[in-house]
Image: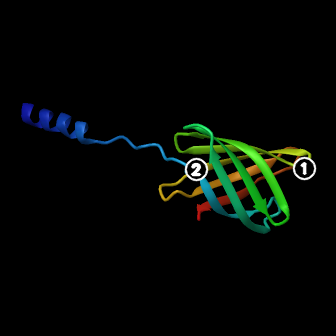
Amino acid sequence: MKTILAGALLGLGLVVPAQAQTVNAGTYTVEGTNLDGSAYGGTATIELTSETTCSIEWHTGSTTSNGICMLYDNAFAAAYVLGDAVGLIVYEAKGDGSLEGAWTISGKDGSGSETLTPQ
């Protein structure tokens, strides 16, 4: 019985906790869906300002928007200004460096989706 217990405890010590994902500075390809379901694309550029914070700029069609962003574990969130509205997007940082998320804009119903893929 002691051998089984010791083996079980040793096995627990070998379990490696999941590591938090990271987000890299650089340019990303943007693929998303608008609130009405139509598709859009473009680029986004992320500049790191600390280990957990950054600035982000999207270029989609003729629209440019700027925001601030923050990484927490594998969640990556950004707030941005789009015209007179404020937007919010929450991504999941994936192991391959991509970001998958959903966004919304103040005063609008529903949400869109967006994927950022490192270039």
Q: Position of residue 47 (x, y in %)?
A: 64, 48
The residue that disc 2 covers is 92
Asked which colour scheme the image uses, the reply is rainbow
In the displayed image of the protein, which residue is found farthest to the right?
Answer: 84
Residue nearer the viewer, 106 or 43: 43
> Nearer the viewer's eye, disc 1 or disc 2?
1
Residue displayed at 73% across by 51% down = 103
Q: Would you say 64 lies left or right of 13 here?
A: right
Q: Amino acid at mark 1?
A: Gly
Q: CA distance from mark 1 to mark 2?
A: 26 Å
Q: Residues within 10 Å of mark 1 (few under 14, many from 20)?
A: few
Q: Earlier in the sequence, mark 1 or mark 2?
A: 1
Q: Are marks 1 and 2 in contact (CB under 8 Å)?
A: no
Residue at x 55%, y 49% (from the top left corner): 23
Q: Which mark is residue 17?
A: none
Side of 5 where 65 appears, left or right: right
Q: Please, what secondary structure does the residue beneath circle 2 have?
A: strand
Q: Position of residue 106 (x, y in %)?
A: 85, 44
Residue annotated with mark 1:
83
Left or right for 71, reference 86:
left
Q: Is residue 82 left or right of residue 41?
A: right
SS label for mark 1 = loop
Up-down: is 20 above or below 58? above
- Whether residue 91 can be seen here: yes
